[in-house]
Amino acid sequence: MYPKQHLAMAAMAASLPLITAGVPAAILFVTASTLMDVDHYLRYLVVVRKITRLKTAYRHYMVQDRAERKLRPGEYAPKGLYILHTVEPFVVLALLMNFWPVLFWAMAGGGLHLALDAYDCRRRGINYTKYISICGYLVKDARFKSPPLHRDSHP
């Protein structure tokens, strides 16, 4: 889903934080839901290994997106680490909510973003697999493998 679509959907859903917690909560909700895709740019910087204009990064994303849209239903898109789409930022927000309760709306905006991404992939018939944990990515990236389990290998 594109940032404009996330912005539109978050703006429509912002009535709940607006009514229950006020304007700052609604702004935080919309901002968190929309700007969560900044990690796509961060991943671009890691892959390309140089800082470029945002427009160039957006073109790179569009080429990648077009390739994913050509996938047949049931095919998998490549896995990638998008750090804001993982569990850890939500855990940090949950801990910080003890001090600043308004951060609940940032977490809710992030949850909306993930739900919209999941819906979009489901609608397109793509099994889009992203790492859900930075720790899981690091373990997998380090080529950590558990020993294979065989049915006939008993001690």
Image (tube, rainbow, N blue to C red):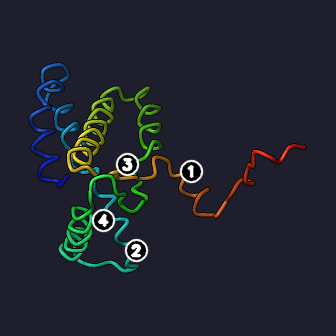
Residue kind at label 4, given as amino acid type: Tyr
Foreground residue, 130 or 151? 151
Distance from disc 3 to disc 1, alpha carbons, whole Å, reads 13 Å
Where is the C terminus found, in terms of image quarters? top right
Q: Position of residue 144 (x, y in %)?
A: 67, 59
**Disc 4 designates what residue?**
41
- Residue 47's disc is 2
Q: Position of residue 63 (x, y in %)?
A: 22, 72
Distance from disc 4 to disc 1, alpha carbons, whole Å, reads 20 Å
Q: Secondary structure at mark 2?
A: helix
Q: Counting other residues with Cα less than 10 Å from the Cα at mark 2, is it few (<14), some (14-19), or many (20 or more)? A: few
Asked if the residue under mark 1 is in contact with the one under mark 4, i.e. CB atoms within 8 Å, the reply is: no
73 sits to left or right of 89: left
**Disc 1 designates what residue?**
135
Q: Secondary structure at mark 4?
A: helix
**Disc 3 designates what residue?**
85
